[in-house]
Image: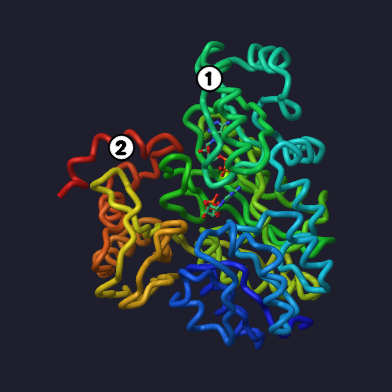
Amino acid sequence: MAIKKLLIANRGEIAVRIIRAARELGIKTVQVHSAADAEMLAVKMADEAVNIGPPHAAKSYLNIEAILKAAKETGADAVHPGYGFLAENAGFADAVEAAGLIFVGPRGDSIRVMGDKVAARVAAEAAGVPVVPGSDGRVDDPEHARHIAMAIGFPIMIKAAAGGGGRGIRIAHDMGEFETLMPQASAEAKAAFGDGGLYIEKVIERARHIEVQILGDGQRAVHCFERECSLQRRRQKVWEEAPSAVLPQAVRDKLCASAVALAEAVNYRGAGTLEYLYDDETHHFYFIEMNTRIQVEHPVTEMITGIDLVREMIRICGGEPLSIRQEDVRINGHAIEVRINAEDPARNFQPAPGTVTALRIPGGPGTRFDTMLYQGYQVPPFYDSLLGKLIVWDGTRSGAIARMARALDELGVEGLPTTKPLHQLLARDASIAKADFHTRWLEPWLEANAHRLNS
Ligand code: ADP
Ligand code: ADP
Ligand code: MG
């Protein structure tokens, strides 16, 4: 292993997850943190910690210079970006390598192609992977935009080329709306992502979100099957499972093969996810984007395959060839993850940071809780509201759902509201038991069930 000391350029539960993998590999860890995060769990767990700046992410977790300085001062030889923040910033990957360090992720050039949602669509088409009908490239010129909109038909999704985290997406139902939304969307994308570039896609109605996990070493890639993340609120994932309950084996084979083909076509290195929309009536799937990093919901794949994805990505980026053979990756049982956020479901999921006065972590068979929480921890108000992920495994999907309901009842986070009550209802819902849902199922369900979340 070429890596001796790994700097973690992230925070929260994913920083904890990366430290665990590094420790098992015998790698020392350096945790960088903002002034607001001095008491976070990863700081306590890491071998060393460095304060890299004020709470505002632009001055700390997005501050490339400060992160590289911390690496230099501590003698770290590699950087793991986690997810969010700089994880899909090609300039950061380049800067890490230019400083003589290993970036635990793909090369900057791969991020430039696959991390840009328009360039990724082009690469997918070139590799023979179906994409959602839409614009061939960015749509800058209003006249050209109107032409494409007419050709694909309404409703139309306007998406930011640099978007992510469910942000930067608008739906236009007719030409009038389209013409109003385009300039607004561009201005917002410019403000949020530093890039006002837009593209447009046909809205796939009643689609399911199915994504394929891959691992590549720059030459060869393998897939670790799919996850289904159709339960979303504001296009953000709420509940994720592996495998999908509805994918016929023949479609699974085609879908996973398409992901491997695309990953190999771009000489992908590290862990990555290809996201698709799937129509369970026609069995058609359409590539939507690639996340060139570890994803929040990676544990469900770990639970059904037995592969430690974070360990594998560190090994590969440390220079070891991919050791996994495709025929050795098998699906065993069913896993579900729910996101426990510091949000109040009774108040329209308003973020509600606070202090954890008591904590009871569920245990027992097939139960895993990846979290940044400990008793007495003060959740800072500056960042993402994710506190932890409850993950369960069982031999069958119905067994996993029962286990999720049981583990949620055991989970106790006192002192601040969390999304646990929502998940308790979902784990006992008849449609969820039948896997009868799609990406726009949860939002109307939330409206209809608001009274049950208000108690
Ligand atoms: P996943 O597919 O792993 O669930 P998400 O899209 O939910 O990934 O994003 C994971 C994290 O990264 C979230 O905290 C999200 O806010 C953040 N994130 C993703 N893309 C971006 C982006 N382009 N800009 C800012 N934050 C992002
Ligand atoms: P992000 O980068 O924010 O994750 P994605 O392109 O992955 O954006 O889309 C996020 C979610 O938005 C998808 O999981 C899906 O629910 C919805 N979505 C995206 N594109 C379409 C589309 N063309 N038709 C219908 N729903 C879509
Ligand atoms: Mg996405």
Residue situated in front as seen by the camera: 274 or 161: 161
Please indicate whether residue 26 sits to the left or right of residue 418 in the image: right
- Whether residue 297 is visible, yes or no, is yes
Type of amino acid at the residue the image marks with label 2: Trp
Quadrant housing residue 49: bottom right
State the image quarter where residue 258 is shown: top right
| Front residue of 299 and 177 | 177
Residue bearing mark 1: 155
Q: Residues within 10 Å of mark 2 (few under 14, many from 20)?
A: few
Report x, y in % for residue 212: 62, 51
Q: Which residue is mark 2?
A: 445
At label 1, which amino acid type do we have?
A: Pro
The residue closer to the viewer here, 75 or 129, is 75
On the image, which quarter does residue 441 sit in?
top left
User: Who comes first in sequence, dot 2 or dot 1?
Assistant: 1
Q: Residue at x 75, y 29 (%)?
A: 137
